[in-house]
Image (cartoon, helix red, strand yellow):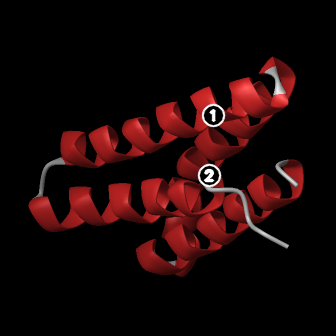
Amino acid sequence: MAVDATVPVVAVGLVGGFAAARYSGRRELGGVVLATAGAWCTRRWAVEKGPAVAGGLLATYLAAFGGSHPLAKKIGAWPSVGLVTVAAAGVTAIATR
């Protein structure tokens, strides 16, 4: 079974956005990575699965980003990003079958 192309892009958006912000020292650069991946995925979801699924998956993606911040205070930054990325990518894989 093939995985939808948006699944790895969700992962790259979350992990890559964090890494870009952290290692460049520029939070806005991380935001560009996050937003670019999210926009590309949302457009593809809307075309292939419809606006309801696209909206739900975008909400999941943004909740993963937002949820990683308070979670990082409890378990650390990288573990938090890893956990929310696995969750968001998993939801995306299921919803885009």
In the image, what residue occupies the spot 29% across and 39% down?
32
- Residue 28 is tagged as none
Q: Indicate left or right for 9 with 2 as reference.
A: left
- Residue 44 is tagged as 1
Between 89 and 22, which is closer to the camera in this rendering? 89
The x, y position of residue 79, in whole percent, is 53, 80
The x, y position of residue 18, in whole percent, is 35, 60
Rounded to the nearest angstrom, the CA distance separating label 1 from label 2 is 8 Å
Q: Indicate left or right for 16 with 86 as reference.
A: left
Question: In the rendered image, which residue does mark 2 sit on?
Answer: 6
Name above or below for residue 87 compared with residue 51: below
Q: In which quarter of the view is residue 85 placed?
A: bottom right
Whichever of labels 1 and 2 marks the residue nearer the N terminus, that label is: 2
Count of marks placed on residues: 2
Asked whether the residues under the numbered discs 1 and 2 touch, taking CB atoms below 8 Å apart as contact, a structural biologist would say yes
The quadrant of the picture occupied by the N terminus is bottom right
Instruction: Kindly identify the amino acid type of the residue bearing the numbered disc 1.
Output: Arg
Element at label 1: helix
The x, y position of residue 70, in whole percent, is 56, 57
Q: In which quarter of the view is residue 7 placed?
A: bottom right
The quadrant of the picture occupied by the C terminus is bottom right
In the image, what residue occupies the spot 69% across and 62% down?
89
Name above or below for residue 4 compared with residue 74: above
Element at label 2: helix
Between 87 and 6, which is closer to the camera in this rendering? 6
In the image, what residue occupies the spot 22% across and 39% down?
28
Q: Residues within 10 Å of mark 1 (few under 14, many from 20)?
A: some
Between 64 and 37, which is closer to the camera in this rendering? 37
Q: Residues within 10 Å of mark 2 (few under 14, many from 20)?
A: many
